[in-house]
Image (cartoon, rainbow, N blue to C red):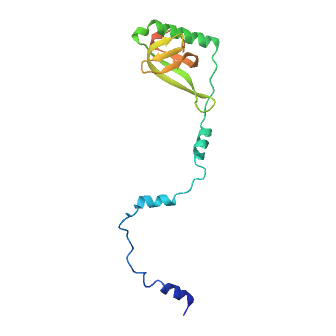
Amino acid sequence: MNPDMKFCHDYDDIINLPHHTSERHPRMPMSSRAAQFSPFAALTGYGDVIDETARLTGRKIPLEDEQKQEIDQKLDILRTVIKTRPEATFRYFVADEKKEGGTYIIVTGNVRRIDAIERLVLLADGKRIPVEDIYSVSSSVFGDLFED
């Protein structure tokens, strides 16, 4: 008898028996079975670190004295008509919380208050814009007073 053939015959008595099903433990669903074969991530979170490093931030653009004066003049005009809650569009710098630099965002809203002490512009929707971070302001209130 061939030794390989002996191996095949060793399990003849059980090969055609029905598969055992436990009465105590339910069968694992097929969707969960795949999870036990998922790849092992030895460096958990490493992908997030790479993504964060690749995320670009920009620098804050320094303003000339004329630009600062123009922004102050525009805020003064908005302050004179503050009771009408004038609509204005602000482009301002937002510092990144995780790394150096940040980004410029543009927000349009109704100005609720301009706090000269805190140096903040408060919009009706609750946004708070630091005056020192404002790069530009536009509003129909200004009319033709400023060149764009």
| Quarter of the figure that contains the N terminus | bottom right
The quadrant holding residue 98 is: top right
Residue at position x 50%, y 12% in the image: 115
Q: Position of residue 130 (x, y in %)?
A: 54, 18
Q: Decide which of 119, 135 is in the foreground and name it.
A: 119
Q: Position of residue 34 (x, y in %)?
A: 47, 60
Q: Position of residue 31 (x, y in %)?
A: 42, 58
The quadrant holding residue 59 is: top right
Residue at position x 56%, y 56% in the image: 40
| Quarter of the figure that contains the C terminus | top right
Side (left or right) of 5 relative to 59: left
Q: Position of residue 125 (x, y in %)?
A: 42, 21
Residue at position x 42%, y 18% in the image: 124
Q: Decide which of 90, 29 is in the foreground and name it.
A: 29
Q: Residue furthest bottom?
A: 1
Q: Residue furthest left?
A: 23
Res. 143 visible in picture: no
Q: Is residue 30 above or below residue 107?
A: below
Residue at position x 64%, y 14% in the image: 64
Res. 67 visible in picture: yes
Q: Decide which of 97, 92 is in the foreground and name it.
A: 97
